[in-house]
Image (spheres, grey):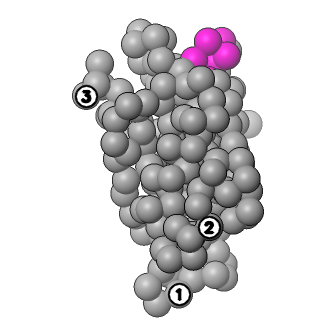
């Protein structure tokens, strides 16, 4: 059975695929709290290999450092859920791929792990086109773990579509 969210995600992913193909761009992902969910949504689209290069699921700090080259001092100073770390993640994803566009997501989906400064539901995003500065955002989503993750997937894709439209 297909849910309304599934249909919305398929439509959104299809729109991103068309926009990337029109602009002759490919996409790379660096996901943490979404655990590959964005990559799953995009690769559900037939023919996505024409515009989706690869995804890095870098859940641990060590993975962020080893796979994406995020500096340990950046994580130490700002925390894994920070604008500084997601910006380093998109930069690393672009460095370690042939893609021209990157998305990074790192957040606290819960139910634990939150702090007063970064409560559960805090998610940081970065979108970056090669040779441009990253666009970073910190959002706060509500609900259980699944709801926070789903909202993160939608937000990442919706903002990417907006950025592609602005740069197209």
Q: Spatial distance from mark 1 to mark 2, Cα to Cα? A: 21 Å
Q: Spatial distance from mark 1 to mark 3, Cα to Cα? A: 35 Å
N-terminal-most mark, 1 or 3? 1
| 12 left or right, relative to 67 | left
Identified at 46% across, 90% down, the residue is: 116
Find numbered disc 1 in the image and state the secondary structure of the residue it sits on.
loop
Identified at 47% across, 39% down, the residue is: 157
The image quadrant that residue 79 belongs to is bottom right
Which residue lies under the disc numbered 3? 166
Label 2 crowd (10 A; few <14 / some 14-19 / many >=20) = some
The image quadrant that residue 70 belongs to is bottom right
Q: Is residue 155 visible?
A: no
Q: Spatial distance from mark 2 to mark 3, Cα to Cα? A: 33 Å
The image quadrant that residue 22 belongs to is top left
Find numbered disc 3 in the image and state the secondary structure of the residue it sits on.
helix
Q: Is residue 80 visible?
A: yes
Q: Are marks 1 and 2 in contact (CB under 8 Å)?
A: no
Q: Choose between 132 and 13: the one closer to the eye.
A: 132
Which label lies toward us, 2 or 3? 2
Which of the labelled discs sits on residue 84, or is there none?
none
Q: Which residues are magenta?
A: 47-52
Identified at 64% across, 48% down, the residue is: 68
Which of the labelled discs sits on residue 72, or is there none?
2
Q: Choose between 70 and 5: the one closer to the eye.
A: 70
Name the spot of residue 82 as percent of width and height, x first: 47, 67
Label 1 crowd (10 A; few <14 / some 14-19 / many >=20) = few
N-terminal-most mark, 1 or 2? 2
Which residue lies under the disc numbered 1? 115
Identified at 50% across, 43% down, the residue is: 91
| Residue 69 is covered by the magenta coloring | no
């Amino acid at each position: 059975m297909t849910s309304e969210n599934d249909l919305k995600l398929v439509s959104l992913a299809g729109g991103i695929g068309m926009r990337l193909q029109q602009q002759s761009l490919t996409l790379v992902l660096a996901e943490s709290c979404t655990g590959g969910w964005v990559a799953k949504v995009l690769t559900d689209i037939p023919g996505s290999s024409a515009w989706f290069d690869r995804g890095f699921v870098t859940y641990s700090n060590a993975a962020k450092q080893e796979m994406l080259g995020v500096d340990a001092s950046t994580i130490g100073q700002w925390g894994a859920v920070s604008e500084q770390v997601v910006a380093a993640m998109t930069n690393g994803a672009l460095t370690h791929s042939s893609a021209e566009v990157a998305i990074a997501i790192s957040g606290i989906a819960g139910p634990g792990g939150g702090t007063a400064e970064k409560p559960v539901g805090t998610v940081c995003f970065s979108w970056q086109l090669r040779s441009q500065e990253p666009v970073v955002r910190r959002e706060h989503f509500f609900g259980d773990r699944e709801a926070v993750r789903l909202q993160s997937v939608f937000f990442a894709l919706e903002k990417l579509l907006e950025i592609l439209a602005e740069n197209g």
